Image: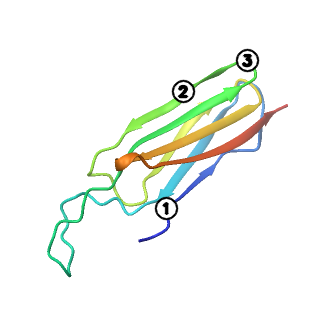
């Protein structure tokens, strides 16, 4: 199985109130539960990223930026691009949740100045 690796791009600096573009990708095989193993003929169990969230945490402001519920039709290596308004210096926290409870997290800091 391929290594599951999240990657994100967040600008390192911005001005207060700027709208920035955030890009998030996770390398994940996304098994739908409908494919058969070629050797055994048995169904490969479903194993997808079923939720993606991004939260902003700052000194005086925190909140959810995006919260996406994913379904089996999503492609392998799901990619998201979205915009967020930066109120102050802080950290964007990303979380991908997989069937079975595995969680992949990554955080990126941004400085306002």
Q: CA distance from mark 2 to mark 3?
A: 14 Å
Screen quadrant of the C terminus: top right
Foreground of the two, 99 or 113? 99
Picture quadrant of residue 33: bottom left
Q: CA distance from mark 2 to mark 1?
A: 24 Å
**Tag shown at residue 64:** 2
Q: CA distance from mark 3 to mark 1?
A: 33 Å
Q: Secondary structure at mark 3?
A: loop
How far from the left and from the top, in percent, is residue 13?
78, 40
Disc tally is 3
Residue that protrudes farthest toward the bottom in the picture? 39
Circle nearer the N terminus (3, 1): 1
The residue that mark 1 highlights is: 4
Residue at 34% from the left image edge and 53% from the top image edge = 48
**Tag shown at residue 102:** none
How far from the left and from the top, in percent, is residue 29?
38, 63
The residue that mark 3 highlights is: 60
């Amino acid at each position: 199985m391929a290594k599951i690796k999240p990657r994100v791009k967040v600008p390192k600096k911005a001005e207060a109130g700027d709208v920035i573009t955030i890009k998030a990708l996770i390398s994940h095989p996304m098994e739908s539960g409908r494919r058969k193993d070629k050797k055994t003929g048995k169904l490969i169990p479903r194993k997808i990223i079923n939720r993606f969230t991004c939260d902003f945490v700052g000194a005086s402001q925190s909140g959810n930026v995006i919260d996406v519920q994913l379904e089996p039709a999503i492609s392998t290596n799901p990619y998201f691009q979205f915009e967020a308004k930066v109120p102050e210096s802080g950290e964007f926290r990303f979380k991908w949740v997989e069937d079975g409870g595995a969680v992949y997290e990554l955080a990126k800091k941004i400085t306002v100045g």
